Amino acid sequence: MSRTLPKFIPRSAPVILLILTLAAAVAFAAVGHLVARFNANQQARGHKLYEQGLADASAGRYDEAIAAFRAALTCDPSNSQYQLSLARALRDSNVPARLDEAESYLTALWQRTPQDGAVNLALARVAAHRGNIDDATRYYHNAMYGVWSSNFDSNRSKARIELIQFLLKEGAPDKAEPELIALAAALPADAAAHLQVARLFAEAHDFNGALTQCREALHLDPKDRAAMACAGQAAFNSGNYATAQHYLQAAVDANPQDANSRRLLETADLVLRANPFRSHISDAERNRRITAAFTQAEKRLDQCAQQTGVDLKAAMPASALVNLHSRWMAVKPDLARLRSAAETDLPDNLMDVVFQIEQQTAAICGPPQGMDEALLLISQKREAASQ
Amino acid sequence: MTSPAAIATPPERPPRPRFTRRLFSRLEGVFHEEVFFLVLSVFIGIFAGLAVVCFRLAIDWTHLALLGPLPQTHSWRLFTVPAIAGLVVAAIVIYMFPGIRGSGVNQTKAALYIFNGVIPFRTAIGKFICAGLAIGSGQSLGPEDPSLQIGASIASALGRWLEISRDKLRLMAPVGAAAGLAAAFNAPISAVLFVIEEVIGRWSAGILGSVVLAAVSSVVVVRGFLGSEPLFRIPVTTFKRPAELIAYVVLGVVGGLASVAFAKSIGFLRPRLKALPRWTQFVQPAVAGLLVGLIGFLGFPQVMGAGYDSMDQAMHGQFAWKILAVLALLKIAATTLSFVSGTPGGMFAPTLFIGAMLGGAVGGIEHIYFPHLTGSTGTYALVGMGVLFAGFLRAPMTSVCMVLEVSGNYEIIVPVIVANTFSYVVSRSLQSMPIFDLLTRQDGLILPSLEQEREETILHVEDAMRPTPAVILSAEDYVDANARRIQDSPDAVFLVRLHPAGWTLVTRGNLQRLDREGKG
């Protein structure tokens, strides 16, 4: 290059520029070829590292996966798939400091393709890791309505379920409820899907919604034991003990090993047998149930007093239990007047004492069993109805 | 009567020149020297851009071939590879390319001011091979300064090949330098400013157009081949409360101190290593490579090579502040070792690395004590880059512009300016001579610098003027009165104000003679 222009070339500007243009074209072609070959090698190497990273990530070896994805990205820096995988590995490694970097990769990807469902879902998960409800909800919604390369309906549904689970975990059932309703409306004819949604309804304390989903599952597969148990449990939790009894009985019949359904069934039976406010029972039966409940309440009080070392016969009402005992003793003589038709408020007054005893002993001595549990459930149902 | 033959024969016309010749002659008129130089600048940019693309590929390929794609700590390759590569580089430099040591910025400047713009083309070849091998093998040096010199060398060679005038040939080197640097850093504006601040050393309107054209065309070429992805991802940067500027002031002061430590360590060690017996020059790069490799082997491979990946991670909160601080210190040590050993390579990337780590560390510490600060670690790391650039390379304008150009975020301009100013002031007060001037003087040369020019007191005529103590006579006064007025004056000649306007002179002798003759 340090030599001067050869003599046979005219020393005029156009000629020189022509020569330079030709030289540049040749150099472009040569460098282009070199870059293409290098890039091809790099892409092959990057893909190999990417697959290694995927294997590490699926085995839970996130540090190795992150190193492999990083190396893959040095081979092909603009590869969205590598960036997304690296971001996921950074996020899933459970190192809080790595969330920033994960978010940075994902934000860059999002800026390029804001409609990409996978990127939005990954960003939503980062926001969920941070406990940021607003951002997570926004990105989950973007993921639901975003573009997916395949399985659009399934991915959309998964994103919504994840959002619901996140909202429930964050203690925002009011925000989860509309998502649940939308999810239930778009469910495929699949019993398992209905059961999954039923569980989410139950987690959101919408037991009627859960019962509806369980019934849908049963409608699709009447022999589905899980659906029977699900419907029984949902009905039980919603206070619909007769329905619960029906489904739980079916569940226990179908699967005698189902201890939970059996226990719930027994409790539902007790509730139905002990509830004095149940319709279609005679006055005599009602009075018998009130008397039994009243007696049971005294037993529960005695047990709890023994458990906590409280003397119920103490002169001064120093504790809640003593106070309750005093109240019980005060209304005990009224039991004799139960048969009188004029005493319309008496059943309520007597059961009010019973309910107070059951509720307070549950608070002091822990959850009750058997008849006491049934009485407590009746009291809760009664309270819910009055509200 | 006219003969029929004469009527039939048309009058003789001069032969029409061929189309191409006409076109060329017209173009010849268009391309006078200034225009030709501008067009040539575009070609310089293209060739420099292509060379830088190849240079980057060479570094990446060398790195992959020698160190592998996956960075693994505690691998023996981490210290053997840079050591062996150091031996090879030393041999090549000593036997084949003795003029390619160091970063290349000073050499380009010397070419401009001393060697009439001549940089041998073999310099580009040598720099390409040796810097590529050194950086690719893990020496703690950057590719930007070598790219600058490669661009300058290509431009100089092109100028000589085309036998352009000596005046223009002198300007070719900075034009090529801007193209090379812009291509290496993917930032044309910063490259132009850096070349003006550090290579040309003064603002010159005559060359600015060519420098900008070359820088832009080289960046276009590089982006065409390698994509427009930045060297590192820019974090989300925020600056909300003006009170937070205090935090950036602290960063500026710390950055200034680090810059001084970095510059002083290079300034101290370089002449001492150069003074060692000649045979040690064969092993100095190898020893430096071994020590840098050991740092990597012991758990900090991030300090090896240019370190852009680590800067990227630092800006995205991948490292705790303690690690960032350690990395900054180790990078200062590693770069000092690599540079003073005479290994060809640049200080541009290491400066940014140190700045990013230091910025992240300072930001991390400040966040511990002041958790309400809104600036992320990435923001501090980004500002830190500019801080070291301003403090160490002493290019304050480039440092601000570089951060803005790289980040594309105007929001952080105030923190950047504040932090860079403090860094620059601290650095200047503790180290009077900028690093490139120091290196130049160590090599026995004195070259102009923009910093010196900024500090020179430029006097205009009016600055030199003082109220005159001389007696001024009036043409309307009598001679005896004027003679009395000049009695106490030591001057021999006096100004006389004419009426109504104008000036003249009168000598003491003439005035006294007229007075003696009684003509007053």
Image (tube, rainbow, N blue to C red):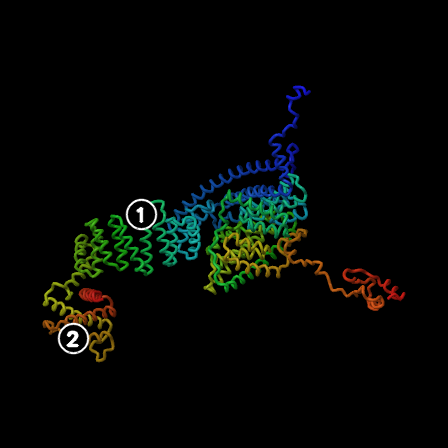
Q: Position of residue B239 (x, y in %)?
A: 48, 60
- Where is mark 1, residue-wise? A153
Mark 1 chain: A
Q: Locate the C terminus of chain B and report the quarter of the image it occupies.
A: bottom right
Query: Is A175 placed left or right of B235 in the picture?
Result: left
Tell me the element at label 2.
helix
Please name the amino acid that badge 2 sits on. Val
At 40% from the left and 45% from the top, the residue drawn is: A51
Answer above or below: position of B445 versus B510. Answer: above
Answer above or below: position of A305 versus A207. Answer: below
Task: Determine if residue B122 is in view.
Answer: no
Q: Position of residue B295 (x, y in %)?
A: 52, 53
- Furthest toward the right, the residue is B517
Task: Name the mark nearer the viewer: 1 or 2.
Answer: 1
Mark 2 chain: A
- Where is mark 2, residue-wise? A331
Residue A280 in which image quadrant = bottom left
Please name the amino acid that badge 1 sits on. Asp
Determine the CA span between mark 1 and mark 2. 62 Å
